[in-house]
Amino acid sequence: MTTPVRILLCDDHTVVRAGLLALIGSEPDIEVVGEAGSGEEAVALTARLRPDVVLMDLQLGPGIDGVEATRRIAGQDVHILVLTTYDTDADITRAIEAGATGYLLKAERPEELFAAIRAAAQGRTTLSPPVASRVMDRMRGAAGPTLTDRERDILGQLARGLGNREIARALFISEATVKTHLGRIYAKLGVDTRSGAVAVATEQRLLSP
């Protein structure tokens, strides 16, 4: 018989893990060897259990999130398949840059999940159709959005971790002006958070060296 693909589940919702456990248990060639309710626990269990694939949620409550857990696990010769409800450009970019092998949405059919797990175990990439579309759109627009010099200045200050008041002081403008420019930056980058803007800007090399 073929050796089953060994899976570690990481999701902070017990009910979700129970559902996945029951679902995956129907597949004879896939075996769940452990469950983690936090990013830290996933990192520790991966080192101890050495699964073939970690099924990783992105939002994990207190502690490190799924992206950081993925980054820490990726160096352990284990494949990470993200399974989440989040499909924003920033989430996808951060997860893939952290080392995720695949990115699947929880709305996918069970058959798609099983196929993605098997593909991940072989090191092959699987993306949910909506995610693949976003990635393709990003590639088609690889030249990146056009930012004004002022927007680039603010983005650079944002990357340094400065708040609106600090950015305003550094650039000798008002906080209201900073907020206005941030709104335009978010819209151009397709994000809705400061961390998302920095992640996309870094990925698209929009930040000055």
Image: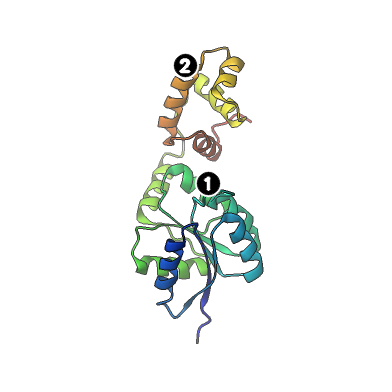
**Picture coordinates of residue 56, whole percent (x, y):** 51, 59
Q: Viewer-proximal residue, 76 or 179?
A: 179
Between the residue at mark 2 and the residue at mark 1, the CA separation in whole angstroms equals 29 Å
Q: Residue at 56% across / 37% down in the picture?
A: 202
Q: Earlier in the sequence, mark 2 or mark 1?
A: 1
Q: Amino acid type of disc 2?
A: Ala
Relative to residue 32, is residue 76 depicted above or below?
above
The picture quadrant where one finds residue 155 is: top right
Residue 146 lies left or right of residue 74; in this view the side is: left
Percent x, y of residue 99: 57, 54
Amino acid at pointer 1: Arg
- Residue hosting label 1: 94
Q: Residue furthest front?
A: 14
Query: 137 or 14: which is nearer to us?
Result: 14
Question: Which percent across, then down, holds residue 135?
Answer: 42, 48
Q: Nearer the viewer, mark 2 or mark 1?
A: 2
Q: Is residue 108 left or right of residue 196?
A: left
Residue at the (64%, 31%) spot, across then down? 209
Residue 203 visible in rendering = yes
Residue carrying label 2: 176
For disc 2, the neighbor class at 10 Å (few under 14, some 14 to 19, many from 20) is few
Where in the figure is residue 175, as x and y percent of width and height? 51, 17
Mark 1 neighbour class, 10 Å CA radius: few under 14, some 14 to 19, many 20 or more: many
